[in-house]
Image (spheres, grey):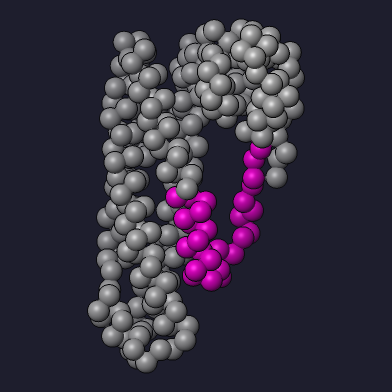
Amino acid sequence: MNTGSKISPFSFVSDIVTNDYRTAEVFRKYGIEYCCGGKWPLKMVCESKNLDLAAVVKELEQSTQTISIPYTIPFETWDIDFLIDYIINIHHVYLKKALPDTKEQLAKFANGHRRKYPELTALEVVFNDLLTDMLPHMVHEEEIIFPYIRQIAHAYDHKESYAGLLVRTLRKPVETVMHHEHESIHKILRAMRQLTGQYTPPPDACTNHRVMYFKLLEIENDLRQHIHLENNILFPRAIDMEKKLLQY
């Protein structure tokens, strides 16, 4: 785990964000301009707003912490309940906050820059499609798909006599989620990549522009890991258990 970057009170606010886009969220929280008007030292800005400098520095340093997930983690061997809890508490919780927050920031940014960068209008539409798809998709998983998978996993592990009947009665469209809904999300991500030039800001991009593209890339990376855990590990295991339970 990266413990986070050290933040100097004498660094310019704009430079802090340029060095790590994640600090922008802290500055937005305190109403501190970090783009074109961010050419002031952090200490001076905090004093002008009567903010606790030490507390702001601590938040900024915490925002730059990175937790790396080793590729050797054997997700495929995890207990079904634990894997589902991981998906909900890591990926769903992140997206439920990141998607609406980013939609708001993208709208503000696009409103002030769409004349210069007309592709922002299409990008905003595509991102809104992502949010419109993902929020009900996650609710559907949490309220219907995941509880069903937990039930059949429990029946499978305990070799319950009613297991086959459970699948026939409660069978949910796991394969539909795996193929249709997730493919729709992949199409949106491909469109976002095309519209942003693989998330590469234009040479004359301002700090806000760069922050926006980095945030979109962060969301894509999370979604790809999220969908991998479901499509390649969780759902295939559930489908395999369904087939075996129907033989009981």
Nearer to us in this view, 212 or 202: 212
State the image coordinates of residue 56 (x, y, percent, origin top left). Answer: 66, 24
The picture quadrant where one finds residue 189 is top left
Q: Relative to 125, is 131 above or below? A: below
**Residue 65 in magenta stretch:** yes
Quadrant of the frame with the N terminus? top right
Query: The magenta stretch spans which residues?
Result: 64-92
**Residue 116 in magenta stretch:** no
Quadrant of the frame with the C terminus? bottom left
The residue sitting at 62% across, 33% down in the picture is 63
Visible residue check, residue 21: no
Nearer to us in this view, 33 or 204: 33
State the image coordinates of residue 93 (x, y, percent, origin top left). Answer: 47, 48
State the image coordinates of residue 113 (x, y, percent, origin top left). Answer: 37, 13
Given the current orientation, which residue lies at the most extreme left position?
169
Horizontal side of 217 relative to 27 (left or right) equals: left
Given the current orientation, which residue lies at the most extreme front position?
50
The residue sitting at 28% across, 73% down in the picture is 171
The residue sitting at 42% across, 59% down in the picture is 230
The residue sitting at 42% across, 72% down in the picture is 150
Horizontal side of 227 relative to 175 (left or right) equals: right
Q: Relative to 36, is 54 above or below? A: below
Visible residue check, residue 42: yes
The picture quadrant where one finds residue 42 is top right
Nearer to us in this view, 228 or 136: 136
Horizontal side of 126 relative to 228 (left or right) equals: left
Q: How many marks?
A: 0
Q: Relative to 1, is 177 above or below? A: below
